[in-house]
Amino acid sequence: MNKNQRIESEMIHGGDAPDHHFGSLATPIYQTSTFSFETAGQGERRFAGEENGYVYSRLGNPTVTVLEQRIATLEKGEKGLAFSSGMAAVSAVLTSLTKKEDHIICSNGLYGCTFGLLKMLEEKYSITHSFSHMESEEKLRSCIQENTTCIFVETPINPTMKVIDLSMVARVAKDAGIKVVVDNTFCSPYLQRPLELGCDIVLHSATKYISGHGDVVAGLVVGKEDYVQSLVKHEQKDMGGVLAPFDAWLLLRGLKTLHVRLDRHSSNAREIAERLQAHPKVKRVFYPGMDSPSQNAIVEKQMANTGGVISFEMKGSKQTAQHFMDQLSLIKIAVSLGDAETLVQHPATMTHAVIPEQERRRMGISDELIRLSIGLESVEDLWDDISQALHQI
Ligand SMILES: *Cc1c(COP(=O)(O)O)cnc(C)c1O
């Protein structure tokens, strides 16, 4: 493989070795749970790690390996690892970086289930966490405790779309000797590559943009070889959240068009965000870099484009927001994001309902907040649907 290939080519070719598959252009699906050995001695050597080769699909599968190599290439990391869901990836990474009574620093806004996992870690293992806006080095540094082992960042933050300066976070973490984990689900490696900015581990809910077609639930992690190897050995092998070969194949297929899709998701979303901003029934629009020069400077520094997710607040109440959603017809009411279909959801009662109200408000999630994952339809059809729904409330 040409090491200097651009990212668009690597979406399609990165990490692949078609010679090993009889020249098959599409990666074959190795739908097998186990692999036979030619001799008992070979079995012994494979188990002892003295000979490379597959053993059992929870420990590795050739279709999944192609995906893991491709995501590692795209994120500019040493090694990738696939999981059965984004949350399997988040939980494996967080449990690998902590032991009982450690402390985690998080961005001031997290995916709802990541928040739920942190609560569980606190209740069962006394692993505490604190939130930071991560607006400056000083503020972030002041959150570090003696028992802090990692910083967990989402940027843009779901669903308020605030961005965090990843090279600043990486600098602070390096000084303190702790790790930075970035949930890069909203960007994908096409828009943002945290490892290039000095962060240590990047993870994805591949269910979203990487799949892109709303037909698979999956997670991915990329980091240094020795770190990922220890994740394989402990968290994944023994906790077992592995990805199925067919699901890996769907993600490989999705990746081939990721760049083309995200260009359109981004241009459609920017257009809708601007039109919403100008609408009299809309109170506020949240879209990366919009309306804030300091936020925009971070977007320009670390993101190739602004992505497909928009949040906005209606003038009114929870009922106004739900009434608006019920008037939409082309746009479907569903959680998840990154699909070809435009989806709308209500964070306070859906994705972030597990978060106590007070905490939710501190994160900027009001009852009037609506999140849109802008799809690949005609932007004019999307606007027709949104503006007729706004007109009816
Ligand atoms: C969806 C999502 C997750 C969880 O991923 P699953 O694939 O649903 O388990 C984690 N982080 C973010 C930002 C997400 O959007």
Image (cartoon, helix red, strand yellow):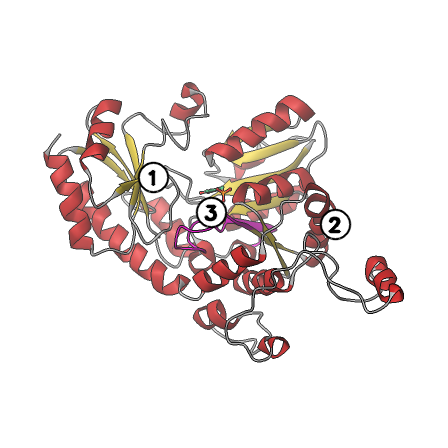
Task: Give the distance between the C-alpha atoms of the residues marked 3 and 1, in whole angstroms.
Answer: 30 Å
Q: Residue 334 has which mark?
A: 1
Q: Earlier in the sequence, mark 3 or mark 2?
A: 3
Q: Check residue 217 for magenta coloring.
A: yes
Q: Which residue is nearer to you in this view: 160 or 148?
A: 160
Task: Give the distance between the C-alpha atoms of the residues marked 3 and 2, in whole angstroms.
Answer: 32 Å
Q: Which residue is nearer to you in this view: 28 or 325?
A: 28
Q: Earlier in the sequence, mark 3 or mark 1?
A: 3
Residue 72 placement, left or right of 112: right
Q: Is mark 2 within 8 Å of ligand 1?
A: no
Residue located at (58% from left, 30% from top): 118
| Residue topped by disc 2 | 233
Q: Identity of the amino acid at label 2?
A: Lys
Percent across and percent down for residue 243 are: 59, 52
Percent across and percent down for residue 69 are: 60, 64
Vertically, is 127 above or below 57? above
| Residue topped by disc 3 | 165
Q: Check residue 309 for magenta coloring.
A: no
Disc 3 vs disc 2: which is toward the camera? 2
- Segment colored magenta: 198-219
Circles 3 and 1: CB distance less than 8 Å?
Answer: no
